[in-house]
Amino acid sequence: MKKKHGFDTWVDALGDKELPILPGSVAQIEAILRDDEFAMRELAQAILQDVGLALSMIRMANAVPHRHFHSEITTCEDAVMMLGTETLRRHVQQSPKLEDRIQEPVRTWYLRLAAQASYASMLAREWAELRHDMVPSEVALAALLYPLGELMLATFDQRCTGSYLELAQNAQVLPHEAEYVALGINLEQMGFELAEHWRLPSMARECMRARNAKHLRSLGVMLAFRLAREAMHGWVHPLLASDIRLAADYLDIQRAELIESLNTVSTQFNAHLALYQQSPVPLLDQDQVEYLLNEGFGPTKPAFCLAPRKDLLENFEAQLGGEELDSKEAVINTLTLALHHGLGLNRVVYARLSREGDALVAQRLEGTDHEPAFNRFHWPLNNDYLMGQLLKRPAPFWLNASNREGIWPQIPDSVRRLIGVRAFFLHSVFIHGRVDGVVYADRRYQQCALDKKTAGAFRQLVMLTMQRLEQLTPVEETPPQ
């Protein structure tokens, strides 16, 4: 499978494919259907334990017009009600099976991903019920489908079993860093494009867009998947403490109650280990968690620093400087891709003024797929001298050792906690003399330093972006200041 810029090729290649069904799903579904008094909730939960089966059922249900359903099918319960149990039985029997589709070592990796998706689904449902969500099963399905891109890659491009598989299994490496080094593509974006193509439920699609972390339902799914990944690694990730804090704040509960919730889900998940051939998820100890929250794991150190890719960078520069990009959104998307995939900056944000005009909020993010806290990027403007100056005219800024002492105290406390680094780039973007947004970029880790060459390339890419935006925006259509 060839990798090309853009995702049309992936959609063309994978658009008619299905994920395989887990070995134990056939017997499990058959056992439930043999009971004349089975509960629909029990059947739906069994389907949700197998991401491949759940995906195919939702796709089938939404592809069939039905006079009793006037909107999209968003839960497995509704999918089974529409299609019927006999259709489910035939589908389970006829669908491709994991053991026939995927060879080792990728099969083990797929089972781990399926287990992680199932754990996230259980946790998202648990939290949705705690939050009195109107449709917890809709949230559960969205969490299950969250890693769609990676699951499809594991199934249909098994040449990735080399460096990506090795990196993906390292708890210290974030998934999008592994993607950068080994694949050169964004798996979350690939999953989103496929979800759009298949018209999966809007909730599932929205959760695959990092910027939607500002919405509480989407944040819950993102955070549940993040903690599911940490659960699969035995709760040893350096960011576990910060994720537990965020989850407790999200649910507005005490940490002891959150730990009880996590242990409840772990116990439920461990009852189905045979389906995924995984080791049990250990239960969290209150004292251990409090120690981590107070002491932490120590400084987070990168497994590696991202390096620029000259060929990609030149390609992105050519796009920004040419006439191929024909919309404002395409230009901004290309800029963020260029800064991350071309220049090697870990986290990139294009932020715009909030409706109230009192803060900058994320509109487009790159390199932050598995950082739900950072994806809620919000830079308040009250009495902010630095941002006040940038919003007066197009200008770059680089926070570094030479100016940090004077500037750092002026940055809002909430921003300092959010970014967790003391070096970054900023550049305000203007169209015909009026501010459109601000670009933020960093390397995520203190050990991965910014330098003058990168600062120059950052500025050049933003300048090309502004030129193209002005070409695409007539003066009379420029929004008022």
Image: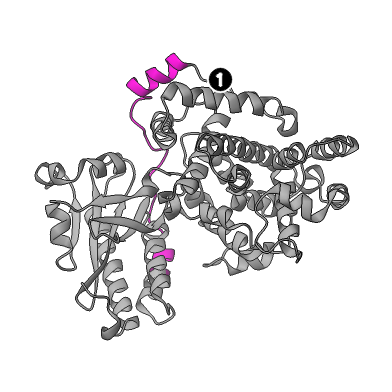
Q: Which residue corresponds to the image point at 60% horizontal and 53% vertical from the top-left?
A: 149
**Place of residue 311 in the rendered image (x, y in percent of width and height, measured from the top left):** 43, 65
**Place of residue 435 in the rendered image (x, y in percent of width and height, measured from the top left):** 23, 69
Where's the C terminus, which quadrant?
A: bottom left
As drawn, which residue projects farthest toward the top?
287
Q: How is the image coloured?
A: one colour
Q: Which residue corresponds to the image point at 72% horizontal and 47% vertical from the top-left?
A: 77
Side (left or right) of 473 relative to 86: left
Above-or-below relation of 82 to 113: below
**Place of residue 216 in the rendered image (x, y in percent of width and height, measured from the top left):** 45, 46
As drawn, which residue projects farthest toward the front?
68
The secondary structure type at the circle numbered 1 is: loop
Q: Which residue corresponds to the image point at 33% horizontal and 41% vertical from the top-left?
A: 445
* Residue stretch in magenta: 286-315
Based on the picture, tell me whether residue 305 belongs to the magenta stretch: yes
* Residue type marked 1: Leu
